[in-house]
Image: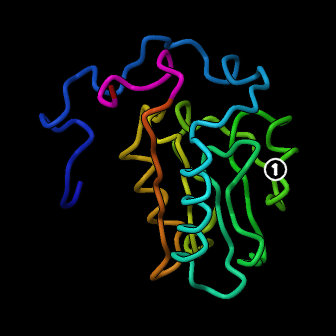
């Protein structure tokens, strides 16, 4: 399996990526929530951070586990933003997205994109819901272009029943 931490590593307890609510995520997220897991100062900071760290001109961006707002500043002028998430209504309200993909990473961590597709992958306040983060992160590495950015932003706000145990 190469270098690095194996998903079966003794670093993680056997139940590290289990959750209080192991029911189907597609059912849980089928309800429109339109909530923000960040306060106004954090939202402003995230948008500024994304704008400063994504340096490519007209980048192609994947918003992983996207919702109704990608926090991508308009002046970034991406050539495309793919939103991968579970709630079609929320994704359709996201003005940043040029493409919507409904996909449950906890059921299948495979990202169905060719190698080196994206300049940047962002995951904003959703990493705490990943039950297979090592596999997802490996896939992100595959679909990023050389020198690409994988930006993971997290907060202490969450749906506790769906957050993995290692996160709490």
Judging depth in this view, the residue of 17 and 47 nearest the camera is 47
Q: Does 41 sit above or below residue 60?
A: above
Check residue 79 for magenta coloring: no
Judging depth in this view, the residue of 40 and 16 nearest the camera is 40
Residue name at image x 46 percent, y 55 percent: 152
Q: Quadrant of residue 70?
A: bottom right
Q: Position of residue 144 (x, y in %)?
A: 52, 71
Q: Position of residue 165 (x, y in %)?
A: 33, 22
Q: Quadrant of residue 38?
A: top right
Q: Position of residue 18 (x, y in %)?
A: 37, 20
Judging depth in this view, the residue of 52 and 14 nearest the camera is 52
Label 1 Cα neighbours within 10 Å, binned few <14 / some 14-19 / many ≥20:
some
Residue name at image x 86 percent, y 35 percent: 89
Chosen colour scheme: rainbow
The residue where tag 1 is placed is 94
Q: Does 76 sit above or below residue 43?
A: below
Residue name at image x 65 percent, y 37 percent: 36
Residue name at image x 77 percent, y 78 percent: 77
Left/right of residue 50 with respect to residue 11 in the rendered view: right
Q: Quadrant of the N terminus?
A: bottom left
Judged from the image, the secondary structure of the residue bearing numbered disc 1 is loop
Give the farthest residue toward the left. 10
Left/right of residue 83 with respect to residue 142 in the rendered view: right
Check residue 166 for magenta coloring: yes
Q: Quadrant of the C terminus?
A: top left
Q: Position of residue 5 (x, y in %)?
A: 20, 49
Left/right of residue 69 with respect to residue 140 in the rendered view: right
Instruction: Kindly report the secondary structure that dominates the magenta region of the rendered protein.
Output: loop
Magenta stretch bounds? 158-167
Q: Does 106 sit above or below residue 150?
A: above
């Amino acid at each position: 399996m190469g270098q690095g931490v194996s998903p079966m590593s003794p670093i993680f307890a056997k139940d590290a990526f289990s959750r209080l609510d192991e029911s189907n995520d597609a059912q849980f997220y089928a309800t429109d929530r339109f909530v923000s897991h960040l306060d106004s100062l954090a939202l402003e900071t995230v948008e500024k951070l994304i704008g400063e760290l994504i340096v490519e001109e007209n980048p192609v961006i994947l918003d992983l586990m996207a919702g109704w707002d990608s926090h991508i500043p308009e002046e970034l002028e991406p050539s495309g933003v793919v939103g991968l998430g579970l709630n079609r209504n929320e994704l359709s309200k996201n003005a940043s997205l040029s493409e919507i993909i409904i996909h449950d990473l906890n059921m299948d961590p495979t990202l169905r994109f060719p190698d080196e597709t994206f300049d940047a992958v962002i995951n904003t306040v959703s990493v705490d819901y990943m039950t297979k983060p090592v596999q997802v992160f490996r896939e992100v590495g595959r679909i990023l272009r050389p020198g690409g950015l994988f930006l993971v932003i997290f907060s202490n706000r969450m749906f506790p029943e769906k957050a993995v145990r290692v996160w709490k």
